[in-house]
Image (spheres, rainbow, N blue to C red):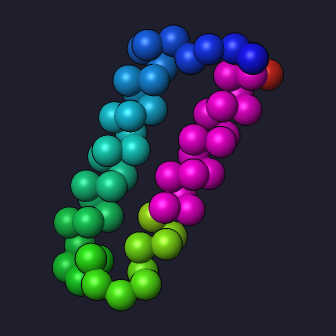
């Protein structure tokens, strides 16, 4: 299995952090069961990056 380069890991971390900040900046996001779409998006993004790296 291919290992992610430090630059690619940093870019993934930055994009996830930006998405999380934008999502949580919206009023009322910390209440209720509405956080699951965020976590689902993060998981799917990470899986997509890993698949791209392994196949690339």
In the figure, 56 relative to 11: above or below? above
Q: Does 42 lie within the magenta span?
A: yes
In the figure, 34 relative to 45: above or below? below
Q: Is residue 50 left or right of residue 16?
A: right
Q: Position of residue 10 (x, y in %)?
A: 38, 23
In the figure, 26 relative to 54: above or below? below
Nearer the observer, 21 or 43? 43
Give the number of marks.
0
Q: Quadrant of the C terminus?
A: top right
Give the residue drawn at x 45%, y 32%. 12
- Dominant secondary structure, magenta: helix
Among all residues in the image, which is located at the extreme bottom? 32
Q: Position of residue 14 (x, y in %)?
A: 34, 34
| Chain part drawn in magenta | 39-54
Q: Position of residue 39 (x, y in %)?
A: 49, 61
Give the residue drawn at x 53%, y 58%. 41
């Amino acid at each position: 299995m291919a290992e992610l380069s430090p630059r690619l890991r940093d870019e993934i971390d930055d994009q996830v952090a930006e998405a999380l900040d934008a999502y949580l900046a919206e009023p009322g996001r910390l209440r209720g069961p509405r956080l699951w779409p965020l976590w689902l998006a993060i998981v799917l993004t990470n899986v997509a990056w890993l698949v791209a790296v392994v196949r690339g």
